[in-house]
Amino acid sequence: MISVIADDITGAAEIAGVCLRYGLKVAFGINSIPVDLADVRVIATDSRSVTEIEAYNIHLKLAAEIFAGSDSLVFKKCDSALRGYVLTELSAMFHVSKFHKILLQPANPVSGRCIRNGIYSIDNERIEKTGFATDPDFPAGNSQVQNLLLLRSTKHENITELHTGKITQLKGKGVFVPDCESIEELQESCELLNEHTLLCGSAAFFEQILIYTKTGIQKETHSQFNIRSNFIMICGSSHPQSRQYIEELSLTGFPVHGFPDLLLKENVSAESLARRTQELVTIWKTNRKLVLYVSFEKIMFPDSSKILKSRMDQIVLGVLRNCKINEVFIEGGATVYGILNLLNWKILNPVQELAPGVLRLQVASNPSVHITIKPGSYKWPDKLIVPE
């Protein structure tokens, strides 16, 4: 059995999608280890949205449970752009494991996410010059992998050494982050693993590990799926690609609605939130479709990111409780996690991988409802939403 801990739910879904592609049975749990028998157990957390201490404790608890068992392989899924408390979470897992070293490979060359001479780039552009530079929670102000990791994690006392660059073997202890600019180099990273090594990285790296260890057989390509009505889409990402997609939907006539100015202020009354929710319920019942986002502008007040996300969660909860919606599309891990928590949708069954990182799941407590989720920086599949 393989166990995977992810630092956000869209990363967990991305791993589950890879497993489906290779014919593996997946059990999907949120903040807990699934009890169902499966080839792969995927545990989704929201540790990227909590404090560093909370992230450490979440991974310490889950890792202790996993390492008490007899899993053949344990994998820590991290963001491919290294957002989050990566070293902190690895330090927690290191503390309760038998491992002496960590192999960290976040790269995904197919998506243009590469490491050369210890410098992270996206589509040949240093990450500090891309949209990740303005990420509201983990901005990339530097492109050196060492700096990206160290600046975001202060609590990593169990990790004393960090190695980057061209790595051909794992000598000594610590974390090793090999350069990677191609699928071939991703495969070469797999050749470095051994029974004394904890594995961490991107979904692309996880897929190559499945191939290297001959776990599963690739059985199917991505499923085709499109929809015209009876859906709601929640765009919870500030990534420029998300903004472009919303603008395209708006131009093709879909009902696209951002927050009015009143809801972008620091203090908002419950009555204002309820009134806006009712307006959107009416819009959905008229159109049987709805696309929601917060704002294209940068909103600055204390804790604005979390407060605005909470308002979106409450609005979506109100719309879903008052409208019979069968298909829910959400981007952005923190947004997905918050909405699922409010709806108490704790058990999800992976159904289809629509594109890399885009997974459609069935809600176990309400099988007529499906939720499709993805990271904010990934693309929705072409022709997912089509005009009537």
Image (cartoon, rainbow, N blue to C red):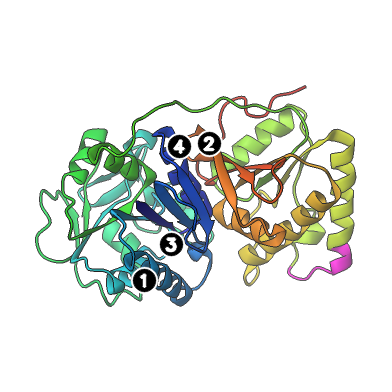
Give the magenta range: 266-272
Q: Are marks 2 and 3 in contact (CB under 8 Å)?
A: no
In the rendering, at what x and y percent does residue 207 appear? Answer: 34, 40
Residue where numbered disc 4 is placed? 20
In the rendered image, the vertical position of residue 169 relative to residue 24, given as above or below = below
Which label lies toward us, 1 or 3?
1
Give neighbour class at mark 4: few <14, some 14-19, many 20+ (Cα, 10 Å): many
At horizontal 31% and vertical 49% (from top left) the residue drawn is 120
**Residue 332 seen in render:** yes
Instruction: Determine the CA span between mark 3 and mark 4.
Output: 26 Å
Q: Are marks 2 and 4 in contact (CB under 8 Å)?
A: no
Residue where numbered disc 3 is placed? 84
Instruction: Determine the CA span between mark 2 and mark 1.
Output: 35 Å
Instruction: Determine the CA span between mark 1 and mark 3.
Output: 21 Å
Give neighbour class at mark 1: few <14, some 14-19, many 20+ (Cα, 10 Å): some
Residue furthest toward the front?
A: 37
**Residue 77 seen in render:** no
Residue where numbered disc 1 is placed? 64
Tell me which corner region of the image, top left, top right, bottom left or bottom right, holds residue 385. Answer: top right
Q: Earlier in the sequence, mark 2 or mark 1?
A: 1
Q: Which amino acid, mark 2?
A: Lys
Tell me which corner region of the image, top left, top right, bottom left or bottom right, holds residue 20. Answer: top left
Q: Which amino acid, mark 3?
A: Gly
In the rendered image, the vertical position of residue 10 relative to residue 229, given as above or below = below
